[in-house]
Amino acid sequence: MRIAISGRRTDPRESIRPATLALAMSKTSATAASRTKSPAAASPSFAETIAPIIYGNCVTCHRPGEAVPFALISYEDVSKRGELIAKVTRSRYMPPWHAVHGYGEFADERRLTDEQIATIGEWVRTGMPRGDLSKMPRGRRPGGEGSWPPTL
């Protein structure tokens, strides 16, 4: 038995405030929702999540015939350098974009979003899963004709 500030005795079961109850329920439902996430949503895969980021922002330079020291075309290329990619994207060293964000809008801005950077880091932390290669992005070859990525 408790004594409320008003001086009345109260039953502890009756003293739950609606806000406290709502908070407890939201935490419970959030916990339940996190447990029901699909494995694909729990950790990003190369085929479905990382390849679109790499192909859209990195392969323009990181491909055979360009001035960079290595290509980032296949899963093997990217996973071999996964930790380095996470580090240089987190520091915003790559992709190179020297304009300071927030000081104007630029056409063709070559900057990763905070979400993309976090996704790359999460992919590396979860062991760089390959994913379903049939879900790889398809499109035009950067700087040329044909489909992308190339058939090896």
Image (cartoon, helix red, strand yellow):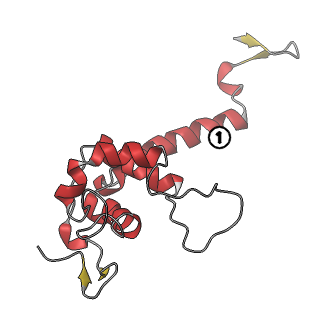
Determine whether 4 is above or below 118 in the image: above
Q: Is residue 24 left or right of residue 42?
A: right
Q: In this view, does 9 lie to the left or right of 24?
A: right
Q: What secondary structure is marked by label 1? A: helix
Identify residue for label 1: 22
Q: Position of residue 46 (x, y in %)?
A: 27, 59
Q: In which quarter of the image is residue 71?
A: bottom left
Picture coordinates of residue 139, whole percent (x, y): 32, 81
Q: Crowding near pointer 1: few (<14 within 10 Å), some, many (20+)?
A: few
Q: Position of residue 137 (x, y in %)?
A: 30, 74
Residue in the picture at 43% in, 53% down: 94
Residue at 70% x, 26% y: name it: 14
Q: Which residue lies furthest to the right in this view?
A: 6
| The N terminus sits in image quarter | top right
| Quadrant of the rendering where the C terminus is positioned | bottom left
Residue 69 in which image quadrant:
bottom left
Is there any visible trace of residue 92 in the rendered image? yes
Left or right: 124 as drawn, with respect to 150: right
| Nearer the observer, 59 or 37 | 59
Residue situated furthest front in the rendering: 67
